[in-house]
Image: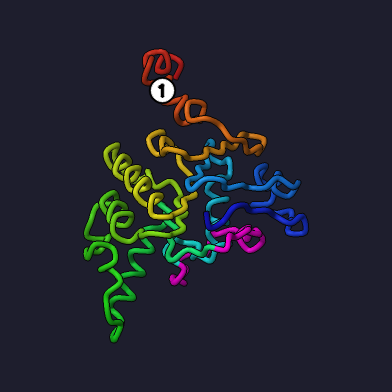
């Protein structure tokens, strides 16, 4: 691990969003986020605050709010919350050699920034070479995500992923799951917000589930909301469709 826990000082409270979110209120009340395994998942319903927490963790770790590595410093439209400026991370002595924040909704902006930087004169080796040599704008959304995790993610890295399954097929999710396993074996740490039952199957991962009251508790794979609900639906879709 590179980071082992995150806490939020009480004096950080602005009484405005996102400090009004139940999950953030819990942090203000003294609950800490603990990262005891190389892969930690955050799961919960839409609006539970998991993406807000992932963004804040990435910003607190020095990453650009729209995504990218720690070297990216651009803003297409500043929409991030101030939560990342207040989170306090506990770091281990071992420091990451590399890292990345993949924010699915703004990866288009990251791809555009890469193209802009590569057009600048005297830049030496093109950044796009680290992504497989093809611009993400010349690949499908899912292919560009796979290029990223295959070519740009490397050993001893710290990676924050916000809903990486957004652009991926089932096979794409399986490919990312396999890549996560490879990278964990190379000393990497992942913190991932997801709705994907496939990704949640990462061996040895810790799954933290947010409920409507903001409580964050560890759950086993079978009890994680995306797994349980998907399994129930696939077992009896007609029952769900009648209800809907």
Report crowding for label 1: few under 14, some 14 to 19, many 20 or more residues within 10 A (C-alpha): some
Q: In this figure, which colouring scheme has been used for the structure?
A: rainbow
> Where's residue 213, x and y in %?
67, 35
Query: Is 108 located above or below residue 235 in the figure?
Result: below
Question: What residue is rendered at 68% in x and 51% in y?
Answer: 19
Name the spot of residue 63 as percent of width and height, x first: 50, 64
**In magenta segment, residue 137:** no
Q: Magenta residues, as a range? A: 70-93
Q: Position of residue 73 (x, y in %)?
A: 47, 72
158 vs 125, left or right, is: right
- Where on the picture, by quarter, is residue 83? bottom right
Instruction: Please determine whether, in this image, residue 153 is positioned above or below residue 168.
Output: below
Q: Does residue 218 sit above or below 223 in this rendering?
A: below
In-image side of 201 versus 170 (left or right): right
Residue 93's image quarter?
bottom right
Q: Can the viewer see residue 17 in this picture?
A: no
């Amino acid at each position: 691990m590179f980071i082992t826990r995150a806490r939020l000082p009480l004096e950080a409270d602005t009484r405005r969003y996102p400090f009004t979110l139940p999950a953030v209120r819990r942090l203000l009340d003294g609950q800490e986020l603990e990262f005891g395994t190389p892969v930690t998942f955050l799961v919960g319903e839409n609006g539970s605050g998991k993406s807000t927490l992932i963004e804040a963790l990435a910003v607190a770790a020095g990453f650009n709010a729209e995504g990218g590595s720690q070297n990216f410093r651009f803003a297409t439209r500043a929409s991030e919350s101030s939560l990342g400026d207040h989170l306090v991370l506990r770091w281990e002595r071992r420091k990451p050699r590399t890292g990345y924040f993949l924010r699915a909704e703004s990866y288009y902006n990251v791809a555009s920034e890469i193209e802009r930087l590569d057009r600048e004169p005297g830049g030496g080796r093109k950044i796009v070479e680290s992504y497989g040599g093809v611009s993400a704008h010349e690949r499908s959304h899912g292919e560009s995500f796979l290029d990223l995790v295959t070519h740009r993610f490397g050993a001893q890295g710290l990676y924050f992923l916000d809903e990486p399954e957004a652009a991926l097929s089932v096979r794409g999710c399986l490919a990312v799951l396999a890549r996560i396993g490879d990278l964990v074996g190379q000393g990497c740490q992942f913190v991932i917000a997801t709705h994907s039952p496939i990704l949640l199957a990462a061996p040895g991962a810790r799954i933290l589930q947010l409920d409507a009251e903001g409580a964050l508790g560890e759950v086993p794979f079978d009890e994680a909301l995306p797994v349980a609900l998907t399994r129930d639906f696939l077992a009896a879709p007609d029952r769900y469709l009648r209800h809907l």
